[in-house]
Image (tube, coloured by chain):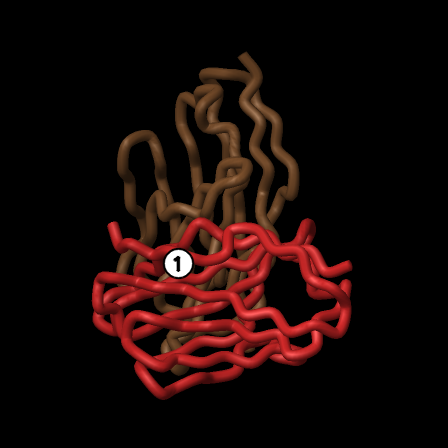
Amino acid sequence: EAAVTQSPRNKVAVTGGKVTLSCNQTNNHNNMYWYRQDTGHGLRLIHYSYGAGSTEKGDIPDGYKASRPSQENFSLILELATPSQTSVYFCASGDVNQDTQYFGPGTRLLVL
Amino acid sequence: GEQVEQLPSILRVQEGSSASINCTYENSASNYFPWYKQEPGENPKLIIDIRSNMERKQTQGLIVLLDKKAKRFSLHITDTQPGDSAMYFCAARGTNTGKLTFGDGTVLTVKP
């Protein structure tokens, strides 16, 4: 199974502050994804990437930016965090020739 | 974009009985349908998937059925055990973007 790690695992931020969530995968997958999970909404796609240097908007991109500086790393950036962004964030990776997405352990973000 | 509806949202069954979860999708071009199991505090893990060139797939007590005409797919867990208690998500992937759209999840509780 693909190795996907996320940091930090837990984060408390203040409203208006900047938050960066990091994701690293070691299986050389081309595609990476950021989701948030809230009760009653399942997993919703925020941003995704097809490879280094590429970022694409997902279904709920407002308030978030993404950065893919390398094949291994994909970051999610909240420039001005709001309490509505309190959630659990999952990163996932997948190979372009396969269908399966492998999820990281998640980051719990609390914005006060 | 794709929309995936998942029912029921809550499912309680007796140990040893079967459990069924149903999902419908809108995009007839969707071609890949994975199922994920998520235990509390953990990340979603793929348990079974089916592609559009198949109607049925079975593995270790799990059966997935796909009805492309009705745009419906379902997960059937036979001989449920307490360890099957978890959140289950279905998802559908469109051929044009490769993105997965998830259902809102089903909380399955297997009573001893």
The residue lying toward the viewer, choosing from A94 and A98, is A94
> Taking B61 as reference, is B101 left or right?
right
Residue sitting at x 45%, y 16% = B16
Marked residue chain, label 1: B
The quadrant where residue A74 appears: bottom left
| The C terminus of chain B, quarter of image | top right
Residue sitting at x 26%, y 55% = A2
> Taking A26 as reference, is B48 left or right?
right
The residue lying toward the viewer, choosing from A98 and A5, is A5
The quadrant where residue B84 appears: top left
Counting from the top left corner in percent of width and height, residue A103 is at 40, 55
Disc 1 target residue: B33
| The N terminus of chain B, quarter of image | bottom right
- Neighbor class of circle 1 (other Cα within 10 Å; few <14, some 14-19, many 20+) is many
Counting from the top left corner in percent of width and height, residue A24 is at 35, 64
- Chain that is red in the image: A
Residue sitting at x 60%, y 77% = A64
- Chain that is brown in the image: B
Q: Relative to residue B16, is residue A67 depicted above or below?
A: below
Residue sitting at x 25%, y 50% = A1
The residue lying toward the viewer, choosing from A27 and B99, is A27
Helix, strand or loop status at disc 1: strand
Give amino acid for label 1: Phe
